[in-house]
């Protein structure tokens, strides 16, 4: 499992997980962090996806949508339309 995770989230500190559930929890934490970045920064969806360890924007977008029910672009747009 570790080798597969390192491929998905490679880089200077690859993710090490003990169970598949650990991997799911790790991905959920990354998406929560992505939601924060989308709401509080001027980063593009692509930049946020890369910052969260996704090599492809499409992988980030589909994972984000699967876990939140909305695309990162739509999420960001909703946040920007809310009154401050």
Image (tube, grey):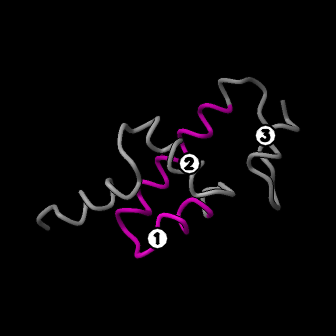
Q: Any magenta on residue 3? A: no
Residue 29 x/y as whole percent: 54, 43
**Which labelled disc corresponds to residue 30?**
2
Comes first in the chain, label 1 or label 2: 2
Q: Secondary structure at mark 2?
A: helix
Q: CA distance from mark 1 to mark 2?
A: 16 Å
**Which labelled disc corresponds to residue 84?**
none
Q: CA distance from mark 1 to mark 3?
A: 25 Å
Which residue is labeled 3 in the image?
5
Q: Can you say whether 22 is above or below 50 in the image?
A: above
Q: Secondary structure at mark 1?
A: loop
Comes first in the chain, label 3 or label 2: 3
Residue 22 x/y as whole percent: 67, 29
**Residues in magenta, as a range:** 23-50
Mark 3, residues whose alpha carbon is within 10 Å: few (<14), some, or many (≥20)?
Answer: some
User: How many numbered marks are there?
Assistant: 3
- In this view of the protein, which residue sits in the foreground, 11 or 54? 54
Q: Quadrant of the N terminus?
A: top right
Residue 28 x/y as whole percent: 53, 38
Q: Can you say whether 74 is above or below 80 in the image?
A: above
Comes first in the chain, label 1 or label 3: 3
Mark 1, residues whose alpha carbon is within 10 Å: few (<14), some, or many (≥20)?
Answer: some
Q: Is residue 15 left or right of residue 42?
A: right
Identified at 39% across, 39% down, the residue is: 68
Q: Any magenta on residue 34? A: yes
Which residue is labeled 1 in the image?
44
Q: Quadrant of the C terminus?
A: bottom left
Q: Which of the 4 quarters of the picture holds residue 83? A: bottom left
Identified at 46% across, 73% down, the residue is: 43
Identified at 27% across, 61% down, the residue is: 77
């Amino acid at each position: 499992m570790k080798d597969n995770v390192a491929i998905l989230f490679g880089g200077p500190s690859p993710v090490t997980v003990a169970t598949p559930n650990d991997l799911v929890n790790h991905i959920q934490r990354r998406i929560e962090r992505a939601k924060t970045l989308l709401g509080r920064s001027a980063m593009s969806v692509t930049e946020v996806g890369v910052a969260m360890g996704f090599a492809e924007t499409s992988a980030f977008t589909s994972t984000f949508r699967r876990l939140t029910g909305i695309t990162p672009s739509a999420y960001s747009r909703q946040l920007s339309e809310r009154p401050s």
